[in-house]
Image (spheres, rainbow, N blue to C red):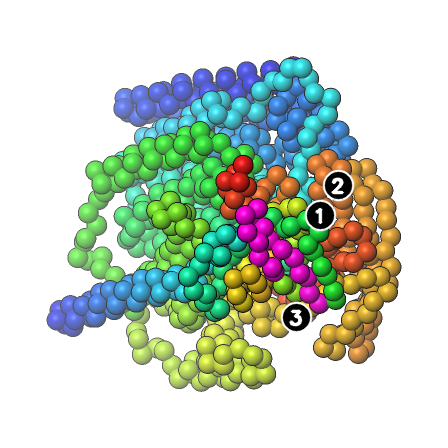
Amino acid sequence: MIASKLGYYSLLLGFAISSFLLFYSLNSFKKKKLSIGSNLVSVMSIQLFSVFLSFVSLIYCFLISDFSNETVYNNSHTTKPIFYKISGSWGNHEGSLLLWLLVLTLFIFLFVIFSKKQPIKYRFLTIFFQQLIITGFFLFLILTSNPFNLLLPVPKEGLGLNPILQDPALAIHPPILYLGYVGTSIIFSASLSSLVNKNVNSDWAKHVKKWTLLTWVFLTIGILLGSIWAYYELGWGGFWFWDPVENVSLIPWLCLTALLHTLTVLEKRNLLKSWTMILSIATFTFSMSGTFLVRSGILNSVHTFANDPERGIFILTFLFILVFLSVILFFSYQENDKNAQNQIHVFSRETSILVNNWFMMYFLSVVLIGTIYPIFIEVLINEKISIGPPFYNKLLIPFLIPFLIFMSIGPNFRWIKDNFKKINYLRIFLFIICLSLSYFIIKDTSLSILISTIFGGSAIYLFLTTVKDLFRKKLLIAQSISHFGFSLFILSILFNSIFSNEFSANMKIGEEFKYKNESIKFLNLKTFEKDNYKSLVANFEIVNSNSSVSMFPEVRIYNEPNILTSEADIITSVFADKFIVMNLIKGEEIFNVRYQTKPFMIWIWMSTILIALGGLVSLFKKKYE
Amino acid sequence: MYGKKVKLRFIFLSSIFLILILSVFLILKSLEENVVYFISPSEIKSLNEIDNNKKIRVGGMVKKNSIQMNQNTINFVITDFKNEINVIYSGAIPNLFGEGKGVVAEGFLNDRSYLKAKKILAKHDENYMPPEVKEALEEKN
């Protein structure tokens, strides 16, 4: 009770401070103040502290199972393990928004500390724009989704947390993803501020690139964690489903990746200013609209905590105001950078980065259209449709091929102007070798030979190029690591999708099935009573020509709320994962069993970590190039 | 020298334009082919003609006592409380599949009362119901 009140009042204090900062920063900007005093930094640290205190109070309420708090009552239960009581505090709508707010304030605080070398006016205005966003979120939280609503009389027991959310990967997935998602706000604020101050230049690019990298690393890892969770918890054995909720995290990622590349051009050549602005604004807009789509209940998924139209309308209005503001600023302050001297030469690094951007924008449009098209159709002609993986495969794969080829050539172009004759026959010869290699790998599968061979060939070619760069370009080590990670990622996905095997059947205890060169035997079933669930653990024996392994998939029957979940058993090895999952259908006699071999799963995860690692290296490198 | 540059730029711009048109065309065409429509059992009954090659989704409740299983297949009946459709499926079943619960089956129609399902859709928790099912149930009440 006290903790809830404390949390609520410190939230109000935080709101008051942001309103103050909003006026103060704008005023200082107008009056052309010469320095950011230590007072302002203290005020901002109080703001950060008050949001932090509010967040800690909420965690405390969850920890002691204080059911007088409505959020706790709706999402917790006394029998839940302590770890999930804590993670449950951000596993719901109100708590996750509080976390969102915490990250927003954290970012602006860090910005003020780490931007001392930047122009004062620019810093003041960045604070202003960021506080504008923060104020909006404070209002959203206090008016529509207060995490500290009190309940009277106090209920004895809570409603419990959705069991599929009770998982270690999912406990840390939201905070990490949020650091990425919300981090785009600081890029947005900084861009608008530099636009108004007319300091969109190389120095600014160098400075804002650090923030972009930081955000990008968190977003990458956040998406990875969600994907790993989906792999072993949802029981389909895949890692990406083209689910709208996954897509809305991929869209900002694509945009951010494009921005990261464009910033390099701005930094080296002082070009593409407007395009950089558009990308910064777009990235944040996509993050916000993603939040809107997910939180408003338009996209139904595990992420939709409550369907409250009022919330959706609030986010939509707020988003509209921000976009409107940024568009106005963009058109009134945009510099004309059509300088004849600064033309981009066709064969140069600048062009290759632009090519990268076009591809990113194409991929982004495909994902965006696939995500929102069903919503539009439903609103317009009241017809319910869904768009599945074939749509994305068909549209993305043909464009991935030239993308991979460009990616292996592009980074080797020089800045400003390169000589086209440098493209030599050795490369073409190597490419042909890659094609034939890919042909031999693919020829025995049931895929369409032509496209797959070219795709595989380009992927192998890119892989070889990035490996070479990794050893050769010591100065561009960060870029080389990320590009190497990406090529490994594409290759792993390719082999994974070609050589995955799947088998499913309805089995009773003692039954045995033969499938290709393996046999699966259902040996026995044990039942355990746990704290908040009943567990059925089966023992399967998988035998193939030279080995046999035991696997133990599990079905959990949770008490509160009463839900069944399947826990897959996965045996990971360097080359392939064995994945088995079972499900109850009717009674506890016959089980629906699905067994899969998934090659190179571990490499998909590892390569994504490598991609993020490249960003991290670049972030901590003092000098680059 | 200048003329060459202008020429290059022209080729450059027109190729961008072409690619743009091509990709828009591809996206639209692909949308047309890969869209899966959602239909209720009642709507299937009133269909004029049946396209066996068009993938559809059927949603409703799994009828009580209708699940029958053998080693390879599962048969059940989807109902929207007005009309019913038989479903035959072989493959993996999501967690919350059961009698009296909401379900969405994706597959191809054999005839007006028979669906060969390729996929049964997962639901995330017991409170969550496919919106289609919710609507069908609300209509009934």
Which SS class for mark 2? strand
- Extent of the magenta region: B72-87
**Residue at the image position 25 percent from the left and 68 percent from the top:** B18
Q: Indicate whether A4 appears above or below B78.
A: above
Q: Which circle marks residue A501 in the picture?
A: 3
- The picture places residue A567, in percent across and down from the top left corner, at 73, 52
- The picture places residue A13, in percent across and down from the top left corner, at 50, 17
Q: Which circle marks residue A558 in the picture?
A: 2
Respond whether the residues carrying marks 1 and 2 are from the same subunit: yes
Is the N terminus of chain B in the top left, top right, bottom left or bottom right quadrant? bottom left
Q: Amino acid at mark 2?
A: Tyr
- The picture places residue B80, in percent across and down from the top left corner, at 56, 48
- Of badges 3 and 1, the one in the foreground is 1
Proximity of marks 1 and 2: CB atoms separated by less than 8 Å: yes
Q: Indicate whether B2 appears above or below A482.
A: below
- Of badges 3 and 2, the one in the foreground is 2
Q: Amino acid at mark 1?
A: Thr
Q: Quadrant of residue A76?
A: top right
Residue under label 1? A565
- The picture places residue A621, in percent across and down from the top left corner, at 50, 50
**To which chain does the residue with label 1 belong?**
A
**Residue at the image position 35 percent from the left and 20 percent from the top:** A23
Query: Could you give the CA–CA distance between mark 1 and mark 2, rounded to whole angstroms?
Result: 8 Å
Proximity of marks 3 and 1: CB atoms separated by less than 8 Å: no
